[in-house]
Image: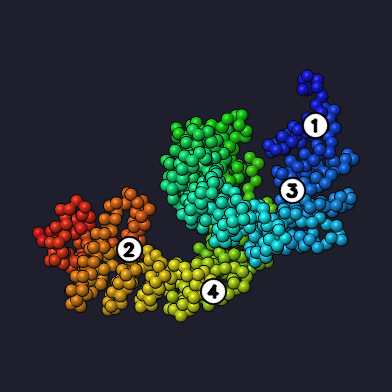
Amino acid sequence: MLRSSITPQVYTINLFISALCDSGRLDYASKVFDEMPKKECVPNVYSFGILIRGYCRNGLSLMGLEVLDRMESVGLEPNMVIFNTLVSGFCREGKVEEAERVVERMRARGLNPNVVTFNARISGLCKAGKVLEGYRIFKDMVEDEEVGLPKPNQITYNLMLDGFCRVGMMEEAKSFVELMRKIGCFEKLESYNTWLAGLVKNGGLFDASELLNEMVGKGIEPSVYSYNIVIDGLCKQKMIPKARSVISLMRNRGVFPDIVTYTTLIHGYCNEDNVFMANKTLDEMVNNGCFPNTFTCNVLLQSLWKEGRIVEAEKLLEKMREKGYGLDIVSCNIVIDGLCKNGKIDKATEIVSGMWHHGSAALGELGNSFLGLIDSKDSGPKCEPDLITYSALINGLCQVGRLDEAKKLLIEMMVKNITPDIVIYNTFVGGYCKHGKVSSAFRVVKEMEKKGFKPNTKTYNLLMWGLGKKRKFSEIQDLMKEMKEKGVPPDVVTCNNLIYCLCEAKMVKKAAALLDEMMRSNILPNVTSYRLLIKTFCKASDFDAAETVLQAALTTLGEKEIIYRLMCNELCTYGKVLEAKEMLKVALDKGFSIENFTYKYLIEELCKGGKVDDAQNLLNCMLNKGYQFDPAIFLPIIDALVNMGEKREANKLSEHMMNMAAHQDKSIEGSHLYPNMMKERSKLNQDSSLGNDWRSILHRDDGSGIALKVLKRVQKGWGQVIYKCEARISCPMLVFDACKMAWYLKC
């Protein structure tokens, strides 16, 4: 147009500025706006409004406010839309006070705020956690007719409901829903979805399912978004089979899963480390005509790197390229983080350096399969390293003690105009503390304060951890005082550090008193809090106090398997075997997994102490409740029964032991068909706390009484029966080994 000597109209320039703002190119938009007078185009109200909207939508409302000042300086009157755009922008950014000042500026201009203005204010207050302040504005809108305030609309009610749910005020939210029903304002899909999301977020999955049924009953067909809310909640609660059933339900109702549905499901499987099912879901997704995007692939990619399955990760990246999915900076950061966590920090450093010149093509350093991952020059900005990239790399270097190299990277990122945040400074604090350089960690804290970063709770927790390793307990208490003085709120990790400090200083009663103080401060103790106290009380032989802490833990945390296991194992360690037996029986009655209970050691100790009946009673309880366990635990009881002359009972248990071992081995033989089952079964013999498994006891040649007596019984009685089984192709190798050993002994 310019070359043809056609002067563009203001309308034309406004279209261009709008397009630049929508694509996030605000620098270009501002440049075009500034050059308008040179092209004989005087910016009008719409020109200013478009630029203000561009800044506000990109989280730069303060720059939008500067444009408003320029607008007023040239004598143009801003309209209601411009003011509402700024109010909404500030509210989205959580800058509620700035939004209120804009409202006052509106009034000074003679413009009365309308319902859009009030909705923006309520939304901003609710997002900032000031729900009660938002509710006061809502009540004013409902009640103060004389002042001339606008009446709430459907959006106002939905915003208020979302606000209550956001901060967990569920009783108020339920009352508000009843109010909305009463005035006929709870009839739209948007309201149902708001309430649905609130219920799911606050653990009301059952109520959310009922709400879905209510929607159908009232003729309000749930959308794919409605179902996705519930599916996301179920996946986060690790209830993936139920999430699958919701997908079946939505299909039956003619609503088909979309990319969000499948991505949520894949994310759920990845969080359970079930990459096999995540991959299968990805295939199902494609087969159903729903094609994944880069985000979907990134979810799976991250899980593969997390598990160290690098070859599969490479194949996925190659598949992404073949399907035309461009690698974004998230993909690159996943690879960098994965390399660091898998010990390939030098390769990660090399790739980050290459990204500045070649973008995602720098991943070609990993091998031929990555060589095609080249950024197109016409596809926008390259995948250049960002704050997350450097955070991952610096964390990797700090973890392995390469702190000088990490410092060089910190300087490099600042040279590249990437400002470090408190996370990176905390990474250095943690790195120095981990490697015993606590004084250097304190110097990092001073440096971050100079840069304008205030130490947060995590900073202090890391320093306390470092001091704890050096057993400088008085300095930990000094840090606690400093936190109070600086207004840094402690969390459960802070309190656990102090509990540890007091326990190590043998001030365990003060440590126990800290639990009450935590509750008064609304800091909920966790498993670690109770573990520290239970272990310390048991070590001091104060088992009554340990029992009191146990009951407090069960009241606060619920009937957690880990608490019962801890108490049982500690009682066993300090010789309270009968009490430990009762604790284990309670765990059995509750159906807890006994994988990490020291049940084998407990049975051995009962037998050594002459409490064979108690040991046998515990064993029978485990058998009757269908538990799978290491067959070696039969051996101490068998040995004790033989010594007592109870050979008939010993032979019965011996036969039971052999049957159980054979059954477990047979299950393992078919494990290739059931990988998850195999994974669970393999845990039976992997816990070092159980000692050697029963096969290794049989194979010992140290002349132990148990091994020799078992082998003699195999020679005398069981050998003939088992030998007949040996010829069967399906016979487990375990039985074959036992037969072979009996034959060797006979020779």
Dot 1, crowdedness within 10 Å: few (<14), some or many (≥20)? some
**Residue visible at 77% across and 62% down in the picture:** 139
- Which residue matches tag 4? 511
- Which residue matches tag 1? 11
N-terminal-most mark, 4 or 1: 1
**Coordinates of residue 656 in the picture (x, y in percent):** 24, 66
Which residue occupies the foreground of this view, 447 or 97? Answer: 97
Residue depth check, mark 4 versus mark 1: number of the one nearer the observer? 1
- Alpha carbon distance from label 4 to label 2: 39 Å
Dot 3, crowdedness within 10 Å: few (<14), some or many (≥20)? many
- Alpha carbon distance from label 4 to label 3: 48 Å
- Which residue matches tag 2? 628
> Mark 3 belongs to which amino acid?
Gly
**Residue visible at 75% across and 52% down in the picture:** 120
Rendering quarter of residue 313: top left
- Alpha carbon distance from label 2 to label 1: 77 Å
Residue depth check, mark 3 versus mark 1: number of the one nearer the observer? 1
Dot 2, crowdedness within 10 Å: few (<14), some or many (≥20)? some
N-terminal-most mark, 2 or 3: 3
Which residue occupies the foreground of this view, 335 or 560? Answer: 560
